[in-house]
């Protein structure tokens, strides 16, 4: 049995309660720890690239990863931002297709890799893992449908307000001034997420600040009024 650092064991993962393996017994987590490889990725490093063959499953221990698709014109679009507890590569893994997107660390990120053969064994032997993976795939599909609907039915102002509220749900933290988004996205990255030009995004961010909806501390955005943002996004909040 190979020696594993105590901090790298699944039982001590800071995101253990959020992931697809959260219902496994301690002995099962011990076995899982023996079959994974833990790596730390610096900002800008890629986990996998669109078009490559999948060899296993990635489980995020901590940090944020952007998942992007590159079109025929070479333009990159951010599909989603994954965080601690999320899994990556699962869709391609189960369909045996090539990766349909690229995963890149937005900051220093700790990720565990589990070989395809072993993860399929775990899923076969543990119904709870299967259910969590199915739930994950279903939520991914729902998010994709909502994003497509938003791009077609909402204007840029509404899409930006909706994006900020979605980031608040996944990366928000209560502070005295409001809700801080604990994720650093460039203006270009945010623009691709709502399907607009960088200049247009900057103009609407300035408008949101002038209206007192948000404020900025460097690259960190603080939501000052989530209820008004929901009104601007045409959401029930």
Image (cartoon, rainbow, N blue to C red):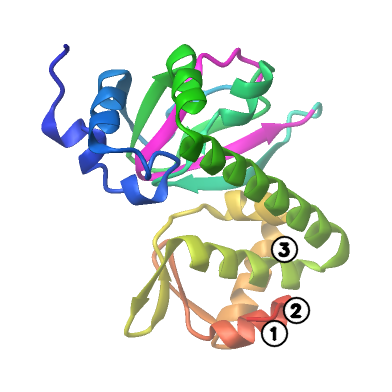
Q: Are marks 1 and 3 in contact (CB under 8 Å)?
A: no
Any magenta on residue 210?
A: no
> Is disc 2 placed on a helix, strand or loop?
loop
Name the quadrant of the C terminus.
Answer: bottom right
Q: Is residue 70 left or right of residue 225?
A: right
* Residue 21 spot, x, y in % from top left: 39, 39
Q: Which of 211 and 107 is in front in this view?
A: 107
Q: Cα distance, mark 1 to mark 3?
A: 20 Å
Question: Can residue 158 be spotted in the picture?
Answer: yes
**Residue on which disc 1 sits:** 231
* Residue 163 spot, x, y in % from top left: 63, 64
Local packing at callout 2 (Cα closer than 10 Å; few below 14, some 14-19, many 20+) is: some
Residue at the spot x=57%, y=55% of the render? 187
Q: Cα distance, mark 1 to mark 2?
A: 5 Å
* Residue 150 spot, x, y in % from top left: 79, 61
> Is disc 3 placed on a helix, strand or loop?
helix
Between tags 1 and 3, which lies in front?
1
96 vs 189: above or below: above
**Residue on which disc 3 sits:** 200
Between tags 2 and 3, which lies in front?
2
Segment tinted magenta in the rendering: 50-71
Q: In this view, does 139 lie to the left or right of 217?
A: right
Going from the N terminus, do you reach mark 2 or mark 3 first? 3
Residue at the spot x=16%, y=36% of the render? 7
Residue 31, label in figure: none
Q: Cα distance, mark 2 to mark 3?
A: 20 Å
**Residue on which disc 2 sits:** 234
């Amino acid at each position: 049995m190979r020696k594993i650092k105590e901090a790298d064991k699944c039982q001590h993962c800071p995101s253990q309660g959020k992931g697809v393996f959260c219902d496994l017994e301690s002995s099962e987590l011990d076995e899982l720890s023996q079959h994974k490889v833990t790596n730390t990725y610096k900002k800008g490093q890629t986990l996998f690239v669109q078009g490559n063959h999948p060899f296993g499953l990635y489980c995020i221990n901590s940090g944020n990863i952007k998942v992007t698709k590159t079109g025929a014109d070479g333009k990159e679009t951010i599909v989603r931002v994954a965080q601690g507890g999320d899994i990556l590569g699962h869709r391609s893994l189960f369909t045996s297709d090539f990766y349909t997107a690229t995963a890149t660390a937005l900051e220093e990120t700790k990720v565990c890799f589990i070989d395809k053969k072993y993860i399929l064994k775990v899923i076969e032997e543990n119904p709870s893992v299967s259910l969590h993976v199915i739930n994950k795939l279903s939520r991914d599909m729902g998010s994709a449908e909502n994003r497509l609907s938003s791009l077609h039915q909402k204007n840029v102002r509404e899409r930006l307000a909706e994006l900020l509220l979605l980031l608040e749900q996944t990366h928000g933290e209560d502070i005295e001034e409001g809700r801080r988004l604990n994720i650093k996205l460039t203006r270009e990255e945010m623009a691709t997420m709502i399907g607009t030009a960088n200049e247009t995004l900057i103009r609407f961010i300035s408008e949101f600040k002038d209206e007192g909806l948000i404020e900025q501390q460097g690259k960190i955005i603080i939501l000052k009024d989530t209820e008004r943002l929901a009104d601007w996004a045409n959401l029930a909040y």
